[in-house]
Structure formats: C-alpha cells, structure tokens
Amino acid sequence: MSRAQSEVPSSAAVWPVLADAERGVLRELLIHGPLPRAEIARRLGVSRASLTRATRALMDHGLVAEGAVELRGATGRPSELLVVRHDARHFLGVKLTGDTVFAVVTDLGARIVAVHEEPISSREPDAVIDQIAVIHARFVEEYGTIVACGVALAGDLTLLDGRQVVKKSQFLGWVDVYLAERLTARLRIPASAENDVRALTATEHWFGAGVGCSSLALITVGAGVGTGFVVDDRVVTGHHGRAGRLDHLPVDSAGPICGQGHRGCVSALLPNAAIVDALRVPGLDFAGAVELARDGHAGARRAFTDAGHALGVLIGTVANALDPEKIVLAGDGLVVMELAGDEVYATIEQVRAPGIPPLSLDIQPFQFDEWARGGAVLGIRTMLQF
Ligand SMILES: [Zn+2]
C-alpha cells in the first residue's frame, strides 16, 4: 500500500459492511454487555461455527475483543467473554429545538464523550444543515472520523417511499424537509432523523432502563409531554409518524384550556409551562414554581397535584393500551413525581383496568444531553440496520 493510501482511512475502516450474523453478535453485545460465545450463539440461534466466523470478522474490524474470563454455571467452568470495543468508533448526535442546536459525540456504547450547544442562527433548513456541518467538522478534528450522525427533533417524521422525511416540525416551522438525505449528502456519512421522543425511546430500549424488555413505554415530561412505544422489540412509528400522541388526552373537564383549545387535556395541566401558567404569578419560571411548591405555597401545591393527576391518567392509559413490561419516565419536568407522587400513584390505580398485574415504573434521572444522545443512538442503530 502506498503512503498516500495508508493515510486515508478506507470506508471499511470507518464502518465495515457487516453480514447479518455479525450485526446480530454486535447488537447482542452492545445491548447486554460482555457475553460468552455459547450464550450469544444461543440467543441468536446460530451454530458455533457461524458464530466463530462472525466473531472473527468483528475482531478483524476492531469492533469486538476477547475480554475477561468468567466462571459460569453450576460447574463453574471458565468462559471467555466477548466485549465491544466501545472507543473504537464515534457517532454524532444532535437535538434541535426551536432556538438551539445541542450536539454530542458518543462512542459505540452510546456513552457521551463530548458535548456542545449553540443558538440556531436561522431556522431555514439549509442554514441548520450548515450549522450541523460546522459542528461535525469541529468534532472530526478532535475525534477523527465520525461514523454516522442522527438528529432528533420534535415533530412528525416518517418514511415516504423509503425516504425519511420531516413531515412537520412546529418549533422549526418545517414542512416536508428531507433532512436525513440532505445531511447525508452534506456530511458524507450516513445521517438519519427521527422524532425526539422515539429516539429517546430507542435509547432506553438499547442502552437504558428498557434493556431486555421487548415491550416498553417511555413518557417524557418537560417543555412538552411525549410518549414512545416499543412493541416486539421495535419502536412504533405509526402510519403518519405520529404514534404516541397522547399529549392532548382529556383529563379534567373543568380544567384550564391548552394552546389547541382543549379544556383540561394533558397539555393544559402537565407541561412545565402549564404549571407556571396555573399560578398566575408575573415573571415566575418553572424553577420558581417548584420552589413555591416545596415551600408549601397552596396554589403551587394545587398546580403540581393537578399535573400529577394528569400524569397518572396518562400512565394508566398507556398501561391499559399497551400492557408494557416497563414504563420509563424521563424529562426535566419529573419533579412532579417528588411533589405529587401520591396523586400520580392514586390516579394510576383509578385508571388501570381491573386485574392487570402491578406496573413496573422506572423514573430516570434526566439531563438535557439525553435528547442529543438519542440522536447518536439513531446513528448507531442505522449502522446496525435496525
Ligand atoms: Zn390539548
């Protein structure tokens, strides 16, 4: 190989073309952590010979290594574990809001290694793509090659004739923007785009509280209220890219009115701004409302109790509709669980269909970076063709 050639990473060195069995092995190791060969073969239903071939290919690509020896089973026989080389590859994840680009770089195990945020200079798609390209270039300088990029944003995203399209994004004012393919062309790496709640649902399913669950629901509470579903190990998109839209579920026929004109829906009671609005204190923000409630302010306690009631209706409805193995709660508005947890649990019990086994509720600590991390997980899943 000439010197010039050796300096340019080939596309295979960035991300190799993987056979089905190789992708399967990598996916099991990413999701479940180090595993012995026999266990991987059992999970995938493949022979030891084909597992050996797949493993050797992944090791040649530098994606997997042989790890520690573990004593397993009643006989305590030593078993060598296969591990993913997490630091071998990097991914770019982006979360777009109406005014900010949040970006992270993660490794192959979706661990954040760098973060960056900057205001959106213009909401025009071309300008946003330019901005992401500049961020990408800066991260490439620092981390070398980025394998893939994923962008998470609030809105309706779907596949149209096999092409990913942002049908509508209210915050960005976008209609029918082919963001994924335009970014792919611009960054010259695989890029994908997805609804932010679905990206976070996928993240919890592979790398978070939902690992090992073939059915799962995620509810996010914060600036908005979002719901994501996993059924039979697949994130549910819906026919129009709008699955999980329970944010205007009716809760209280005597409640306040939401921005869509519904009286007492989830969005009129549960989002951070709804709680602040209920207090009618000039200049108050959400942190101030939380402080008032913690100090025992009657109006603030009432607003959080009403929010807790709305969350309980939502959780109970999701449990009845999906019967998931687990419901994960995330978002920066989950202080409602601290301030009105009793109301949430009491309402869940009222709403739940009789005879359903106890609910597994998992409340996740949440930082805003999680949204952009969801974008990086899109990139990881894209490379695994999942
Ligand atoms: Zn509404």
Image: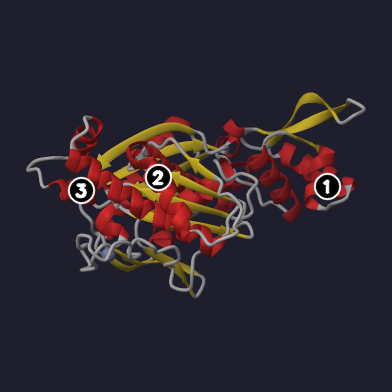
Quick one: SS at disc 1? helix
The picture places residue 104, in percent across and down from the top left corner, at: 41, 38
Q: Do residues under tags 2 and 3 come within 8 Å of each other at their CB atoms? A: no
Q: Residue at x 30, y 38 (%)?
A: 117
Q: Which marked residue is nearer to the observer: mark 3 or mark 1?
A: 1
Q: Secondary structure at mark 2?
A: helix
Numbered disc total: 3
Splitting the image into four quadrants, where does ligand 1 fall? bottom left
Q: How are the residues colored?
A: secondary structure
- At label 2, the amino acid type is Trp
- The residue pinned by badge 1 equals 42
| Residue wearing tag 2 | 371
Mark toward the start of the polypeptide (1 vs 2): 1
Q: Residue furthest bottom?
A: 161
Residue at point 19%, 39% (across, down): 298
Which residue is labeled 3 in the image? 121
Residue furthest toward the right? 75
Callout 1: CB less than 8 Å from ligand 1:
no
Mark toward the viewer: 2 or 3 = 2
Q: Compute the Cα span from label 3 to label 1.
A: 51 Å
Quadrant where the C terminus lies?
bottom right
Q: Dot 2, how many residues are within 10 Å of its Cα: few (below 14), some (14-19), or many (20+)?
A: many
Q: Nearer the viewer, residue 284 or 344?
A: 344
Q: Secondary structure at mark 3?
A: loop
Mark 2 vs mark 3, CA separation in Å: 20 Å
Residue 244 % position (x, y): 44, 62
Which amino acid, by three-letter code, is at mark 1?
Answer: Arg
- 3 or 1: tag closer to the N-terminus: 1
Label 1 close to label 2 by CB (< 8 Å)? no
Mark 2 / mark 3, whichever is N-terminal: 3
Residue 149 spot, x, y in % from top left: 46, 48
